[in-house]
Image: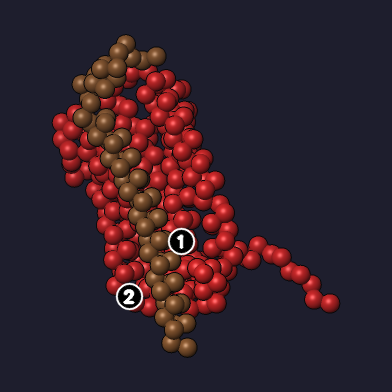
Amino acid sequence: MQWNSVSEFFAMGGYAFYVWGSFGATAAVMLLEMLHVRRQRQEMRRSLRNELLSEGASS
Amino acid sequence: MKTSDIHWFKFSSPPNFYWLAGRMWPWFATLAATLTLIGLWIAFFVAPIDAQQGQGYRIIFVHVPASQMAMFIYLVMAAWAGFGLAFNTRLSGMMASALAPTGALFAFLSLLTGALWGKPMWGTWWVWDARLTSTLILLFLYLGFLALQSSIDDARRADKACAVLALVGVVNVPIIYFSVNWWNTLHQGASVSLSKSPSMAAPMLWGMLIMVVAFWMYTIAVTLARVRTIILDRERHTEWVKNAVE
């Protein structure tokens, strides 16, 4: 184990901002990308279903 | 009697690939999550402190995977785009467009984590150094691809224009890779290469390699998930899409 205490772990030897900033930004970008992909899919399915319904109504 | 020809190209038809991608992406996502947890464990609890950079070097565990992903995605994207241009296959352009946003995000993360690493170690967020500048150009190539894609309404024409842009831009990838050898740069040389044994401690190397594979799995998962939406959009007037969304 590299760390003697939890606070030492979070301090990252004085590089806390840089290390947690890097890992945090990467995690945030990936999370947002996944949410975005899911939302795009939901919106696409909704728009396709609406298209189908309006076609059904007009025919 | 008609022979049942089951062949490899079966999955290059959009409806089949839509189904296949839907079956595959959760597996890649599971692999990505598992490998990320193992990689993070090694990165923070197994890999020792660095003699020169202290704990600050741990940025390597996201910086290197993001950077190599940004370059590899560009090569794969250009290969799909070029294949589509040569053989006029429908799926190729969709795959290229599905890869571009993820590539752009990794190029952005490469620059951001690089800046966060450069500030404490070099004393500056940014220098106009060959490696950094060519990576910035990579980000602009991705953004150019995405902008061009969205500016042309006809998807097939957009694919062709984007394929040309992607192929021309490929020249930038070897420039990024070899920049640290070709020019005097502030950025350090490769720690891992095919020609010599890696110049880093084993747990650091393993942690980094596992994170690299985790990012690959993530990229495959998110690209397959995204291409399904693109397929639905481009095939919206076909019977199979109507059946698929009902």
Q: Nearer the viewer, residue B196 or B55?
A: B55
Relative to B20, residue B27 above or below? above
Q: Circle 2 — which element?
A: loop
Q: Measured from the top left, where is residue B3 in percent x and y?
A: 79, 72
Q: Residues within 10 Å of mark 2 (few under 14, many from 20)?
A: some
**Residue at left offset 43%, top offset 25%:** B42
- Find chain A in the image and tell me its colour: brown
The amino acid type, in three-letter code, at marker 2 is Ile
Count every numbered label the image shows and give the total: 2
The amino acid type, in three-letter code, at marker 1 is Val
Q: Which numbered circle lies on residue B227?
A: 1
Indicate the chain on which mark 2 is placed: B
Mark 2 — residue?
Answer: B152
Residue that lies at the very extreme toward the front in this rendered image: A57
Q: Measured from the top left, where is residue A11 in percent x and y?
A: 23, 21
Quadrant position of residue B145: bottom left
Q: Nearer the viewer, residue B65 or B245?
A: B245
